[in-house]
Image (tube, rainbow, N blue to C red):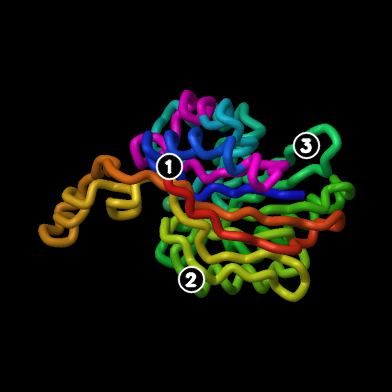
């Protein structure tokens, strides 16, 4: 199968780039499933039900999130009822929504997607290593036909991401990093068949700072005034990866996508 993963979609320009480039990329890479991180899709912070629906309507099959998931309060009831918008698994068991979901299309093998969040330089969370092992054991027991498992690891520290990649090698199809918004060039198929990249990149304006207006972000450092910034304006890019897998759910190859609209 060919799985397209779109790196953090930032604001309206990110949604615009995704909607414009999705048909092109789906056609070029014969994409079977599309997964995107949408935690910055609403004005750069969080996601709303309407924006989640718009992303799904443009052809994204499942949306992962991260630390900004609770930014807009109307996402809370929506998450509770959604099977295709998920939040990090390794937070409180009382949190609304789910951290693992399975999507399936006719004629294709099912794809399980797990969303995890890091613990280094991130808000408090349970251990992603032990949480993922437990969840994988449960998944294998309850859904033995699921061989393809994509993990979005939303984390800051490169070391934590690489450690989880190697820890889960052979147990999952791919571990794709998000949150840092800068695509890394370390994509690799690990020895047991897990595709790994530290950060899949950002979908939005590349003239800014992580997709946000640089004229508002620079003063956060120079003045110590920490305020939300607006989404940047300028050149839009879709960044992500395409993972190609075999029937056993092992990855064969991964290519990085950096496509200007
Ligand atoms: Fe994030």
First of labels 3, 2 by sequence position: 3
Q: How far apart are the alpha carbons under marks 3 and 2?
A: 31 Å
Quadrant of the frame with the C terminus:
top left
Q: Say which residue appears at 88% left-offset and 49% top-offset.
A: 144
Residue 251 located left or right of residue 140: left
- The region drawn magenta spans 26-54
Q: Which residue is mark 2?
A: 158
Comes first in the chain, label 2 or label 1: 2
Q: Is residue 146 left or right of residue 191?
A: right
Please name the residue that numbered disc 3 is placed on: 104
The Cα atoms of the two marked residues, 1 and 3, are separated by 29 Å
Look at the numbered disc 3 and say if its residue's Cβ is closer than 8 Å to ligand 1: no
- Check if mark 3's residue and mark 2's residue have beta carbons within 8 Å: no
Residue at 86%, 58% in the rendered image: 248
Mark seen at residue 261: 1
Q: Are marks 2 and 1 in contact (CB under 8 Å)?
A: no
- Dividing the picture into quadrants, the one containing residue 218 is bottom left
Instruction: Give the mark nearest the N terminus, 1 or 3.
Output: 3
Q: Residue furthest left?
A: 223
């Amino acid at each position: 199968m060919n799985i397209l993963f779109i790196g953090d979609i930032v604001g309206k320009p990110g949604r615009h780039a995704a909607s414009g480039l999705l048909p092109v990329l789906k056609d070029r890479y014969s994409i079977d499933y599309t997964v995107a991180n949408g935690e910055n899709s609403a004005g750069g912070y969080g996601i709303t039900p309407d924006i989640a629906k718009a992303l799904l309507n443009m052809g994204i099959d499942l949306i992962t999130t991260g630390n900004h998931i609770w930014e807009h309060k109307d996402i809370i009831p929506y998450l509770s009822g959604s099977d295709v918008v998920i939040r990090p698994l390794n937070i409180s068991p009382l949190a609304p929504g789910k951290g693992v979901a399975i999507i399936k299309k006719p004629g294709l093998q099912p794809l399980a997607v797990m969303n995890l969040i890091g613990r280094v330089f991130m808000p408090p969370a349970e251990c992603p290593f032990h949480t993922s092992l437990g969840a994988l054991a449960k998944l294998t027991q309850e859904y033995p036909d699921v061989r393809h498992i994509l993990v979005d690891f939303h984390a800051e520290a490169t070391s934590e991401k690489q450690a989880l990649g190697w820890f889960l090698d052979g147990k999952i199809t791919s571990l794709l990093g998000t949150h840092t918004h800068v695509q890394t060039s370390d994509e690799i198929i690990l020895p047991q068949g897990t595709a790994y990249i530290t950060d899949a990149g950002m979908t939005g304006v590349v003239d800014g700072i992580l997709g946000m207006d640089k004229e508002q972000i620079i003063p956060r450092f120079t003045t110590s005034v920490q305020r939300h910034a607006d989404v940047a304006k300028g050149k839009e890019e879709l960044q992500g990866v395409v993972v190609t897998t075999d029937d056993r759910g092992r990855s064969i190859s991964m290519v990085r996508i950096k496509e200007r609209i």
